[in-house]
Amino acid sequence: MKTSHIVIGAFMLWSAGLANICLAQAFAMGAPSASADSTQTQTDFLLVQLKNGAWFYGQVVEWNKKDQTLTLDTDSLGTILFRRKHISRTIPGPITARERLEITGNERANRNQFLSRRMWRNPFEAPNPHAGRYFFAPSAFQLKKGEANYHNSFLLSNEMGTGFTDDLTVGTNIIFDLGFGLAAKFGRALTSNVHISAGGAVLFPFRSQPAYVAGFVNPIFPVNDGENSTAALVFANVTWGTEKRNITFNWWASNASGFDTNVFNISALLPINEQTWLITENYFQDKPGGMVGSIGIRRFIKRWGFPLDYAFVALPEGYATAFVGATIPINH
């Protein structure tokens, strides 16, 4: 082999090695350092589900492990930055539009099926203030047609109310050991925040009873002193506000002995939080010593699906007593 051929071959090998070294250095200088700032740039595709149930699909622009963020170039909303704490899960791509629709559609179907089963087990889970009544006094709100409630007070008074129409609520009551009653309330909405209603009730006593129950005057439904006579009551009211925040003014009249004067009532329901309401219920007679006041809370028990009432009642005799009640929805 000629010396010139050897020199030319050596020069070509040396040139190729030098070129490889230069290219390697160039790639090393141009590539980002993942250890420098814990940031990685990728070209993967991801289907991302957030904890609120929303889905996003796109190409990964950047994973920043230090800041716990993901930057995604979505196909419809452009570049979006997500924080790791908001991400529920990720599904690696690429994924076709049809496959994405199947994944997200099945997820929604499973979730709706789960919710429907859960609501079937407990259809009254959503907090409901049952704004048609306070502790005893009615408001102008009505039950909707077909709705029904059962109410118990002191484990003695048992009331059942049904929405005969959207404007008419009818009910029945058994008070141990006083008597059996019937009641009705008709009402209308004047505006979205003003409602009016009027109604009445009648109690047929099991036997002759005084107007005093358990040692104190019953200010809501006193019994007539007459022998085996019925006690009748009529009322009219107006309610301002919504079902979860309202105030009601009531006027009452009764044929019961000692209650043949006008009785006025002011009641209010105010929310404390999502499942607790403050209630005050106060009665005034146009004669001395005729005031009864009460204050308490209505607490919705999510595990049971209905609210409980707790209150302190100040009586005209100068002492107070406790009140406990429950309103159980039957059909809502």
Image: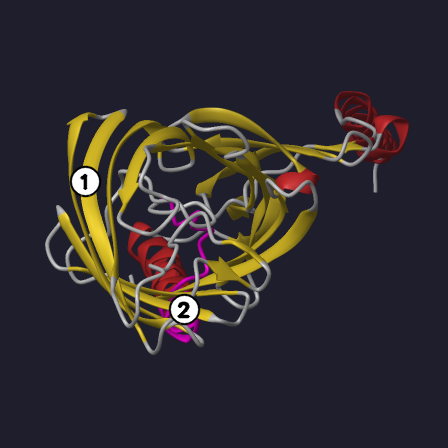
| Quarter of the figure with the C terminus | bottom left
Q: Is residue 203 magenta?
A: no
> Amino acid type of disc 2?
Gln
CB of mark 2 within 8 Å of CB of mark 1?
A: no
Name the foreground residue: 322 vs 186.
322
As measured in the structure, the alpha-carbon distance from the residue carrying label 2 to the one carrying label 1 is: 27 Å
Q: Is residue 231 above or below residue 181?
A: above
Few, some or many C-alpha atoms within 10 Å of disc 2 (few <14, some 14-19, many ≥20)? some
**Where is residue 4, by image quadrant?**
top right
Few, some or many C-alpha atoms within 10 Å of disc 1 (few <14, some 14-19, many ≥20)? many
Q: Which residues are magenta?
A: 114-131
Name the foreground residue: 325 vs 236.
236
Name the foreground residue: 100 vs 264.
264
The disc placed on residue 198 is: 1
Coordinates of residue 93 in the picture (x, y in percent): 49, 52
Q: Is residue 12 above or below residue 223?
A: above
Q: Which residue is mark 2?
A: 209
Residue found at x 55% / y 47%: 275
> Amino acid type of disc 1?
Ala
Residue found at x 42% / y 75%: 121
Name the foreground residue: 194 vs 98.
194
Coordinates of residue 266 in the picture (x, y in percent): 43, 30
